[in-house]
Image (spheres, helix red, strand yellow):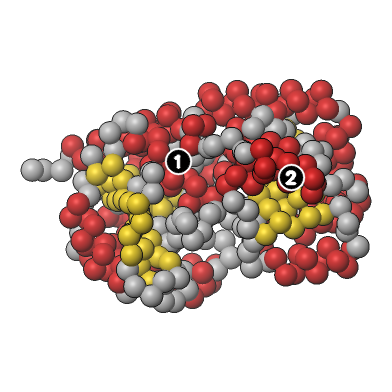
């Protein structure tokens, strides 16, 4: 079974949550005989291919990105070519340009679409886009939501009926390499081992301004790992607040990231807008048996982090509540440890890479079998 994954960004250029979700789908379903290729865009001058452990990655030059919608004309040709190899095409939404590429390509292979998030910020453009999306969705054979919470609260998903199913994102523990001694030593030297950790792209919906305000109130150490469009503004805010307990690492290698997870007291994930549909970072925290702090925004973050069991759930955009949650975990280490253990158990029971991989493999096989020879 050959499956073509199609999304606007992918590793090694971009390391966001959807990219990690695609990697884990490739790894998990690969255990059931599924072979993957990833077709994507990158800041390059000509088409190139990269062999990664989970998939071959075909990268086309990025040419435009209006309203965060990445575009590249080479994708029209490459999509048709790679579709010849594929038995099933797996598209990751939202990315309106993918709708256009698929509809204009004339490709008639079965399509599964993972619906990661509603379009939130570009609401005026979303209204103009609806007719294209409706036509595209009519050509899609199966649509997957990543949590029951998002399925229930999304106005788009709620109208899809039997075409939509739910498969959570997942992690395969073996896909993560334990941190090396040098990385662990560097983390301990720089930050100690009692800090709260945020990992991710620094975007507007991540709630990091609230995290800085909370850090100013509780004075607990915070490490913010990653870079992104909000980085300069956040650093300016931290400087204005005089925060010496907050550290921005910029981009970190996988070894450094695993060392940060290993040494942190807990994972803080204050995303405040529905653009945060799931939160792969929360799963990574559970992999390391760390307690979680997240916000109730009606999405999969609360599906991953069960309030009072695997961590604490607070209202969004509430610095005082976030500061209290951080203080609670810092002052109650036994409770924090128990929550971390419960999170690891939940990861194994609900979000294991093998379970998620089997679920997607079943969809691929079903759709592939439906094609007339």
CA distance separating discs 1 and 2: 26 Å
Q: Is residue 273 visible?
A: no
**In the displayed structure image, the side of residue 49 where residue 237 appears, left or right:** right
Above or below, comparing residue 344 to residue 190 in the picture: above
Residue at point 21% right, 46% down? Answer: 87
Q: State whether residue 122 is above or below residue 114.
A: below
Name the residue located 48 percent from the left edge and 45 percent from the top edge.
Answer: 21
Which quadrant holds residue 239?
bottom right
Given residues 121 and 219, the one toward you in this image is 219
Say few, some or many: other residues with alpha carbon within 10 Å of mark 2 (under 14 / 14 to 19 / 20 or more). many
Q: Is residue 280 left or right of residue 99?
A: right
Q: Estimate the x, y position of residue 175 in percent, counting from the top left.
A: 48, 36
Q: Determine which of the numbered discs, if any, sits on residue 205 in the image.
A: none
Say what secondary structure mark 2 lies in. helix
* Nearer to us in this view, 169 or 191: 191
Q: Quadrant of residue 28?
A: top left
Disc count in the image? Answer: 2
Give the residue pinned by disc 1: 24
Of helix, strand and loop, which one carries label 1? helix
Name the quarter where the C terminus is drawn.
Answer: top left
Q: Is residue 242 left or right of residue 180?
A: right
Q: Earlier in the sequence, mark 1 or mark 2?
A: 1
User: What residue do we see at 85% from left, 56% from top?
Assistant: 213
Residue position marked by numbered label 2 in the rendering: 187
Where does residue 167 sit, x and y in percent of width and height?
44, 36
Q: Residue furthest front?
A: 182
Q: Position of residue 109 (x, y in %)?
A: 21, 51
Classify mark 1: residues with Cα within 10 Å, few (<14), some (14-19) or many (20+): many
Task: Name the residue rendered at 49%, 51% in the picture.
Answer: 18
Q: Nearer the viewer, residue 142 or 238?
A: 238
Vertical comparison of 162 with 136: above or below: above
Relative to 191, 5 lies left or right: left
């Amino acid at each position: 079974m050959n499956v073509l994954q199609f999304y606007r960004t992918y590793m090694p250029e971009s390391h966001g949550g959807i990219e990690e979700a695609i990697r884990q789908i490739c790894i998990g379903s690969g255990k059931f005989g599924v072979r993957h290729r990833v077709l994507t865009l990158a800041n390059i001058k000509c088409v190139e291919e990269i062999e990664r452990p989970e998939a071959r990655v075909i990268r086309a030059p990025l040419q435009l990105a209006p309203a965060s919608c990445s575009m590249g004309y080479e994708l029209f040709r490459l999509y048709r070519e790679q579709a010849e190899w594929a038995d099933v095409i797996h598209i990751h939404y939202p990315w309106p340009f993918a709708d256009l590429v698929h509809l204009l390509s004339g490709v008639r292979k079965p399509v599964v679409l993972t619906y990661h998030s509603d379009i939130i910020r570009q609401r005026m453009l979303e209204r103009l886009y609806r007719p294209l999306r409706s036509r595209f969705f009519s050509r899609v054979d199966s649509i997957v939501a990543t949590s029951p919470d998002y399925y229930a609260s999304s106005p788009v998903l709620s109208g899809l009926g039997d075409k939509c199913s739910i498969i959570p994102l997942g992690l395969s523990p073996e896909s993560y390499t334990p941190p090396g001694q040098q990385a662990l030593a560097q983390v301990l030297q720089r930050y100690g081992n009692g800090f709260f950790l945020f990992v991710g792209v620094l975007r507007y919906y991540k709630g990091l301004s609230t995290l800085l305000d909370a850090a100013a109130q509780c004075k607990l150490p915070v490490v913010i790992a990653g870079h992104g469009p909000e980085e300069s503004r956040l650093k300016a805010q931290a400087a204005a607040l005089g925060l010496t307990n907050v550290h921005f690492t910029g981009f970190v290698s996988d070894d450094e990231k695993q060392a940060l997870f290993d040494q942190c007291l807990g994972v803080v994930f204050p995303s405040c807008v529905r653009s945060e549909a799931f939160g792969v970072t929360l799963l990574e925290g559970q992999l390391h048996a760390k307690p979680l702090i997240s916000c109730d925004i009606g999405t999969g973050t609360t599906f991953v982090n069960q309030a009072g069991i695997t961590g604490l759930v607070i209202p969004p955009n509430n610095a005082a509540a976030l500061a209290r949650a951080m203080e609670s975990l810092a002052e109650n280490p036994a409770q924090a440890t128990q929550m971390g253990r419960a999170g690891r158990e939940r990861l194994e029971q609900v979000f294991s890479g093998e379970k998620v991989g089997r679920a997607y493999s079943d969809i691929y096989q079903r759709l592939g079998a439906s094609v007339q020879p």
